[in-house]
Amino acid sequence: MMEALSAAFFMAWAVGANDSAKAVGTAVGSGVIGFKRAVLLIAVFTTIGAVIGHSAVSGTVTKLADGMTPIQISLVLFSAASAVTLASLWGRPISTTQSIIGALVGSSLALGLPVDWATIARIVSAWVLSPVLAAFLAIGVYKLYKPLLGRIKGLKNLELTQKWLVFLASAYSAFNLGTNELGNVIGLSQSASLSNPNVFIALTMAFGTLTFSREVMMTIGKNISPLGPTSAFSSQFGAAIAVSSANLLGLPVSSGQAIVGAISGLGLYKGERVNKSLLLDIVKSWIRAPLFAGVLTFFLIKLFSAGF
């Protein structure tokens, strides 16, 4: 029990250190809210998403863990969290979802369990499509949103409207984070015989945001492409819609991939500078993380099975 609890908390902390930046990075990077308020936003809305949000995502992930013992699921969580933590050290917004799926595949191969390759294929296809969909949605939101701003009278009213819209888009994204990425951790935790871990896991994730998310937050909010309040709202809202669509289908996509796709797609559409070398490095990390988690889980389970 303690092994499962420790691994679940490590994974939740890693989600906070990496994935939370994808919910509030645009708001912080555009100067709409400060870092401490961003942490509070994450703590409140992610907890709400984890407690009352309904998503078929955790069921999809839990199904991939069929036949595994609590100890084996703990190794899955530990390996995925290790991959995410290494990426956070480099300030790279990777996918905790991909890391968990990679770890689950590695553990199934190590244990000789059947891998549901059809479900894996659906998930991988969603990983490819979600940043593209988010980019188009961000552009669509921007094209609808920008003309509406021109109708607002007074500079103070305009600034207040933009700030509230960015805040609401970030809150929506944080809610999605609770139902999607955190839903993966909660689903696996329950498979490892932990009962009702939602609130504790959500609060642990908030602690990860407070202690270790700043580098990834700056990558999202400042380093990919310049973000003002209008671009921040359009990117965040477009990415959130893409993630919500995947939630409805029970597909565990990455909010990180969605927000990176939204920011870069909108930046290219507006003709602004997009850091293509950083984007390439981020995409490479999306491939490295699940492979690392899968290989690490495979060897850890083999070691434990051998009696170490």
Image (tube, rainbow, N blue to C red):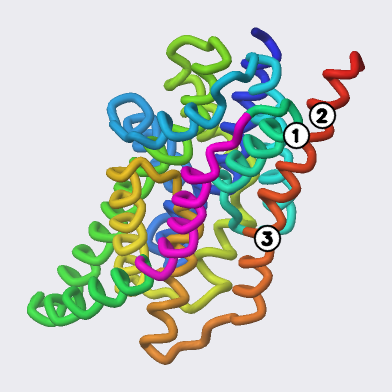
Q: Is residue 128 magenta?
A: yes
Whole-number angstrom distance, CA of label 3 to CA of label 1: 18 Å
Left-right relation of 39 to 154: right
- Identify residue for label 1: 297
Q: Is residue 88 magenta?
A: no
- Identify residue for label 2: 300
All told, the count of numbered labels is 3
Residue 64 point in image, percent of width and height: 53, 31
Identify residue type, mark 1.
Thr
Foreground mark, 2 or 3, reads 2
Left-right relation of 263 to 175: right
Q: Residues within 10 Å of mark 1 (few under 14, many from 20)?
A: many
Left-right relation of 305 to 25: right
Question: What is the span of residues highlighted in magenta in the rendered image?
Answer: 114-133
Identify residue type, mark 3.
Ser
Choose the circle earlier in sequence order: 3 or 1: 3
